[in-house]
């Protein structure tokens, strides 16, 4: 999860907040999981020997989580919810202690990641009707958010250049079409900005069709970047209505801006070489973050952070 150039990465037993630009890290114990969550482990197993449900990307402990900034106080906060035991908690990174929040009006799926936009964290759920849930990080109050009147097959909510965005998929003329919608967070009204035909060459090798197009950013020229659950990076040229794949096998894609303000909070560490958790999974990720080679700058101040398994090469986006 990202916000203002800070990256929040949960791992078993810990939650880490880092500022890659300053080389600083805050590390908070997450405590034990509320209950045994082994019943969810089947999501990581092959289905009919054909594919793995890799797009069901759960946080450790199967919490529903969010990360964002209180726009009034300036504090960064982490939210987690576990609905089996009706637990909702929030952590201000300046203080470093979890405290309880009133439960939201309905649950959201743990594998659908949240989006932070203009002081609120947003989640959506499909289990009991198509709904969008928001939490104002200053008032710490949950609220329902109007949704576009459309087919509920939608990709995760994302922050698209400081606007809440989602993608809906519908079938027309034997092609899957992706419609990109953005929300005015003040009026809470939706506008469709792109309609993209997904060509057969870009279809999944999997029997699912609802995460073809995850919005990423828009360049100054109006070209639209998105990726899919195969972690392929695409570029859409609206003037000529053309999609091209510009990168494959990318590990993580996330909007990113430089943040040169030092972190505030208890026990701030630096990395490298101050990060000493050599056995931690997160330390292996940190060692892959080399700023000169992993920041892909666009022509605006927006950038893309790409963490790769195989290489740290990069290419400019325009």
Image (spheres, grey):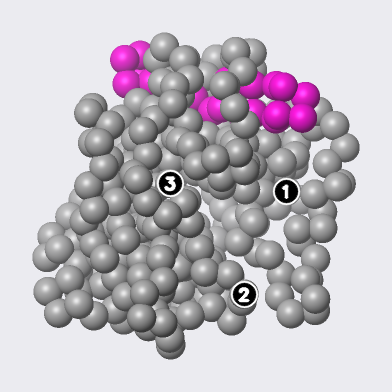
Camera sees residue 245: no
Compared with residue 60, is residue 229 higher up or lower down, i.e. above or below?
below
In front of the other: 305 or 44: 44
In front of the other: 177 or 215: 177
Say which residue label 2 marks. 207
Compared with residue 292, is residue 241 higher up or lower down, i.e. above or below?
below
Compared with residue 231, is residue 130 higher up or lower down, i.e. above or below?
above
In which quadrant of the rendered view does residue 198 lie?
bottom left
Q: From which residue to which does the magenta span run? A: 69-90
Label 1, residues with CA under 10 Å away: few <14, some 14-19, many ≥20: few
In the shown orientation, is residue 252 left or right of residue 38?
Answer: left
Label 3, residues with CA under 10 Å away: few <14, some 14-19, many ≥20: many
Q: Quadrant of the C terminus?
A: bottom left
Answer with mark 2 or mark 1, whichever residue precedes in sequence.
2
Q: Pointer 2 and pointer 3: residues touching (CB < 8 Å)? A: no
Residue 116 in percent (x, y) is at 40, 36
Find residue 280 and name its label.
1
Residue 22 in percent (x, y) is at 40, 41
In front of the other: 163 or 150: 150
Answer with mark 2 or mark 3, whichever residue precedes in sequence.
3
Q: CA distance from mark 2 to mark 1?
A: 35 Å
Q: Residue at x 80, y 49 (%)?
A: 40
Say which residue label 3 marks. 157
């Amino acid at each position: 999860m990202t916000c203002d150039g800070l990256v929040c990465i949960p791992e078993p037993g810990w939650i880490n907040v880092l500022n890659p630009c300053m080389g600083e890290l805050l590390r908070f114990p997450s405590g034990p999981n509320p209950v045994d969550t082994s019943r969810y482990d089947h999501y990581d197993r092959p289905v009919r020997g054909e594919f793995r449900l890799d797009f069901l990307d759960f946080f450790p402990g199967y919490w529903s989580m969010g990360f964002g900034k209180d726009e009034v106080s300036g504090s960064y906060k982490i939210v987690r919810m576990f609905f089996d035991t009706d637990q909702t908690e929030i952590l201000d990174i300046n203080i470093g202690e979890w405290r309880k929040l009133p439960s939201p009006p309905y649950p959201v799926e743990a594998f659908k990641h949240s989006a932070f936009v203009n002081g609120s964290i947003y989640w959506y759920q499909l289990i009991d009707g198509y709904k969008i849930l928001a939490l104002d990080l200053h008032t710490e109050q949950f609220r329902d958010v109007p949704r576009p009147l459309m087919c509920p097959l939608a990709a995760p909510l994302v922050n698209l250049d400081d606007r809440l965005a989602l993608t809906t998929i519908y079938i027309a003329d034997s092609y899957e079409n992706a419609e990109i919608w953005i929300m005015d967070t003040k009026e809470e009204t939706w506008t469709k900005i792109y309609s993209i035909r997904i060509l057969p060459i870009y279809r999944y090798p999997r029997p699912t069709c609802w995460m073809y197009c995850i919005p990423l950013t828009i360049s100054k020229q109006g070209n639209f970047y998105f990726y899919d659950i195969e972690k392929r990076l695409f570029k859409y040229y609206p003037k000529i209505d053309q999609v091209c794949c510009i990168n494959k096998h990318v590990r993580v894609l996330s909007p990113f801006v430089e943040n040169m303000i030092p972190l505030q909070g208890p026990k701030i560490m630096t990395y490298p070489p101050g990060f000493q958790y050599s056995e931690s999974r997160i330390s292996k990720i940190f060692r892959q973050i080399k700023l000169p080679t992993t920041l892909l700058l666009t022509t605006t101040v927006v950038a893309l952070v790409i963490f790769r398994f195989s290489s740290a090469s990069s290419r400019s986006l325009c």
